[in-house]
């Protein structure tokens, strides 16, 4: 899916795993990878779930606003000067509900506007500026939260046109579930609405993580019917071959020499412990290799 991030359709993956099995690590490693390869022009926006904001459109727009405003402004200025460019091409030709953002989109690409004006117009789209007066200043009717759906599509297509791709990494969705199953169901409903707009978004990628406690089919059968094949479950590392490979990697990291007999001994010890998360597996391997207990995060910072 990452290889197809510059395609004709947005994609998504849901990573499900218990605490300590590596969900957040996947996102952090991806972030480091893209930071180390700026030539790819792929930007991972890491964000934890917000229990007080369960509309995924407003949630993602806020993170675009906070992390990609410079690129949005530059993209708008670049595109409005491009020969043959038509704003309608970024907004489903203003068909269906996109008709509600027709005037706003045309104003956004109006030539001659300075950076501050363009930035304020983007703020009108994200919701940072929302008063009737703020819209009237630019001769526009007020956008509603419902219109944010089409605005998100528009903004992502602007970024795609300047070859700036975004990976939204939304972590710890279970926090919304812990707060309220009703909130989780509402979030999933907006997720389903976004999924239905994927074919109108040029590329980009949404990764969401949650624990096994969140049962998507029970909370939103319509969403589950769409993303069932996009769900990846990460279980505890338990196969001998995988554990042996992990021991070798950790030994290399710690600069400890191990032979095959030592590796087999460590693997057998780990299997007997019946550890219940990958975090504890890694910790136990490292402690065995170092032949002393590892300090916890709290102890390190005391």
Image (cartoon, helix red, strand yellow):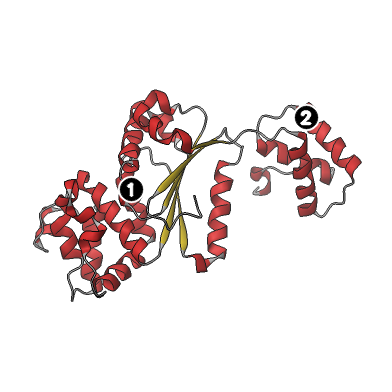
Label 2 or label 1, whichever lies nearer to me, is 1
Label 1 sits on a secondary structure element that is helix
Disc 2 from disc 1: Cα separation: 46 Å
Q: Residues within 10 Å of mark 2 (few under 14, many from 20)?
A: some
The answer, for residue 131, to whether it is visible in the render is: yes
* Residue that sits furthest to the top in the current view: 218
- Expressed as whole percent of the image width and height from the top left, the position of residue 293 reads 78, 41
Where 30 falls versus 37 (above or below)?
above
Where 235 falls versus 248 (above or below)?
above
Q: Residues within 10 Å of mark 1 (few under 14, many from 20)?
A: some
- Expressed as whole percent of the image width and height from the top left, the position of residue 269 reads 82, 32
Sooner in the amino-acid sequence: mark 2 or mark 1: 1
Front residue of 205 and 280: 205
Q: 156 left or right of 173?
A: left
Label 2 sits on a secondary structure element that is helix
CB atoms of marks 2 and 1 within 8 Å: no
Q: Which residue is mark 2?
A: 271
Front residue of 258 and 39: 39
- Expressed as whole percent of the image width and height from the top left, the position of residue 140 reads 10, 58
Give the residue displayed 30% in from the left and 39% down from the top.
193
Give the residue displayed 39% in from the left and 35% down from the top.
226
Q: Which residue is mark 1?
A: 199
Give the residue displayed 26% in from the left and 59% down from the top.
90
Residue 139's quadrant in the figure?
bottom left
Q: 141 left or right of 297?
A: left
Q: 264 left or right of 210?
A: right
The answer, for residue 129, to whether it is visible in the render is: no
Front residue of 116 and 190: 190
Q: 170 left or right of 78?
A: right
- Expressed as whole percent of the image width and height from the top left, the position of residue 208 reads 46, 42
Question: Number of callouts in the render?
Answer: 2
């Amino acid at each position: 899916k990452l290889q197809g991030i510059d395609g004709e359709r947005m994609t998504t993956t849901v990573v499900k795993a218990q605490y300590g099995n590596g969900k957040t690590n996947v996102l952090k490693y991806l972030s480091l990878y893209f930071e180390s390869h700026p030539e790819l022009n792929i930007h991972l926006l890491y964000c934890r779930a917000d229990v007080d904001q369960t509309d995924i459109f407003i949630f993602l727009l806020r993170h675009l606003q906070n992390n990609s405003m410079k690129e949005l402004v530059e993209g708008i200025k670049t595109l409005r000067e491009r020969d043959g460019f038509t704003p309608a091409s970024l907004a489903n030709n203003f068909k269906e509900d996109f008709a509600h953002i027709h005037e706003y989109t045309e104003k956004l690409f109006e030539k001659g506007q300075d950076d501050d004006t363009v930035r304020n117009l983007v703020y009108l789209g994200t919701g940072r500026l929302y008063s009737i007066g703020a819209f009237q200043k630019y001769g526009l009717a007020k956008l509603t939260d419902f219109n944010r759906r089409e605005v998100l599509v528009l903004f992502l297509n602007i970024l795609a046109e300047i070859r700036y791709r975004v990976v939204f990494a939304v972590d710890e969705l279970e926090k919304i579930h812990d707060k309220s199953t009703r909130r989780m169901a509402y979030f999933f409903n907006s997720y389903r609405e976004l999924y239905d707009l994927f074919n109108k978004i040029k590329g980009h990628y949404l990764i969401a993580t949650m624990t096994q406690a969140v049962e998507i089919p029970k909370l939103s059968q319509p969403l589950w019917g769409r993303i069932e094949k996009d769900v990846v479950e990460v279980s505890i590392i338990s196969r001998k071959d995988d554990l042996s490979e992990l021991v070798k990697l950790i030994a290399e990291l710690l600069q400890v020499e191990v032979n095959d007999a030592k590796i087999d001994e460590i693997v057998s010890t780990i299997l007997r412990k019946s550890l219940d998360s990958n975090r504890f597996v890694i910790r136990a391997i490292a402690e065995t290799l170092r032949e002393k207990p590892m300090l916890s995060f709290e102890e390190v910072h005391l």
